[in-house]
């Protein structure tokens, strides 16, 4: 793909695109499975139950640590033989809340790349989840200065992208959604008529896995190995 010289609007995902996120959840899940120490279910089987419970909790609690904590507690209730005492409840919720204590680990070459992109294009952060939780990450990341606008949405679907286009007066022809998730970043953006850039991450959350859609003509889909590669295209 040749370098795009014209000014574009770049909507950029946050978690696992700009900074590490899911690795902390994976560690919490590993600790939870070890703590549960189920005698009949393998670790993989416990994880399958947790995945299903997480899907259910997203519908009722949205995305974020609050929802994740609920999912761990409900999984324990479904699988454990022993009753859920207040002490056990606090221990299990502690696996989730420990994630909030991790400092933001910005991925390699992110500040330099954002500096380049924001100098040539209109750059906006678009992330989903709890507003206070995500806002806190943005503040602690030290990256806020690079964004002309920051949007925190409950979910990323075609309707959400359509709303952003209308709210900010964007031209879909020159608007790109950039992120690591086929399910939330790439496919719904394409469905909303935008262009997209897929930046794979080795530890993308399993519930964000999905086959990457093809871009309908004349929309464009770009796949890069690293976020820093965007400097070659924009």
Image (spheres, rainbow, N blue to C red):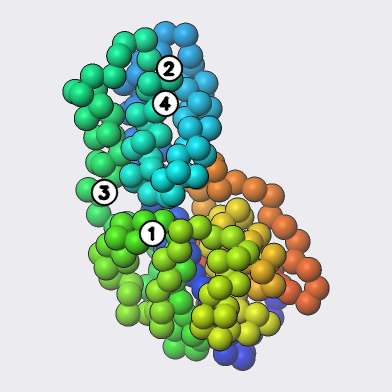
Q: Check if mark 1's residue and mark 2's residue have beta carbons within 8 Å.
A: no
Point out the tag, 3 or 1, that comes first from the N-terminus: 1
Q: Which residue is mark 1?
A: 19
The residue sitting at 37% across, 79% down in the picture is: 146
Which of label 3 and label 2 is nearer to you? 2
Residue 184 lies, in percent from the top left, at 56, 57
The residue sitting at 50% across, 44% down in the picture is: 59
Residue count near mark 2 (Cα–Cα under 10 Å), binned few <14, some 14–19, many ≥20: some
Residue 166 lies, in percent from the top left, at 57, 80
Point out the tag, 1 or 4, that comes first from the N-terminus: 1
Residue count near mark 1 (Cα–Cα under 10 Å), binned few <14, some 14–19, many ≥20: some
Q: Check if mark 4's residue and mark 3's residue have beta carbons within 8 Å.
A: no
Point out the tag, 3 or 2, that comes first from the N-terminus: 2
Which of label 1 and label 4 is nearer to you? 4
Residue count near mark 3 (Cα–Cα under 10 Å), binned few <14, some 14–19, many ≥20: few
Q: Check if mark 3's residue and mark 2's residue have beta carbons within 8 Å.
A: no
Q: Which residue is mark 4?
A: 75
The quadrant where residue 218 appears: bottom right
The quadrant where residue 148 appears: bottom left
Q: Which residue is mark 2?
A: 79
The numbered dot on residue 100 is 3
Height in image: 15 above or below 123? Answer: above
Measured in 3D between alpha carbons, the distance from the residue under mark 1 to the one under mark 2, in whole angstroms, is: 33 Å
């Amino acid at each position: 793909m040749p370098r795009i010289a014209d000014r574009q609007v770049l909507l950029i995902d946050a978690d696992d695109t700009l900074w590490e996120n899911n690795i902390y959840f994976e560690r919490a899940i590993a600790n939870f499975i070890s703590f549960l120490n189920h005698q009949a279910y393998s670790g993989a089987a416990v994880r399958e139950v947790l995945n299903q419970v997480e899907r259910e909790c997203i519908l009722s609690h949205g995305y974020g640590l609050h929802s994740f904590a609920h999912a761990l507690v409900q999984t324990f209730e479904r699988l454990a033989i022993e009753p859920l005492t207040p002490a056990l409840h606090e221990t299990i919720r502690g696996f989730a809340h420990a994630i909030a204590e991790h400092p933001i680990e910005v991925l390699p070459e992110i500040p330099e790349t954002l500096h380049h992109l924001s100098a040539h294009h209109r750059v906006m952060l678009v992330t989903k989840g709890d507003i206070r939780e995500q806002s806190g990450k943005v503040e602690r990341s030290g990256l806020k200065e690079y964004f002309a606008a920051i949007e925190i949405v409950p979910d990323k679907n075609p309707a959400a992208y359509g709303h952003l286009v209308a709210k900010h007066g964007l031209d879909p022809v020159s608007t790109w959604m950039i992120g690591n998730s086929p399910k939330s970043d790439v496919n719904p953006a394409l469905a909303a008529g935008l262009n997209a850039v897929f930046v794979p991450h080795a530890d993308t959350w399993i519930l964000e896995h999905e086959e990457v859609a093809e871009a309908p003509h004349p929309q464009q889909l770009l796949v890069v190995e690293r976020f820093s590669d965007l400097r070659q295209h924009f």
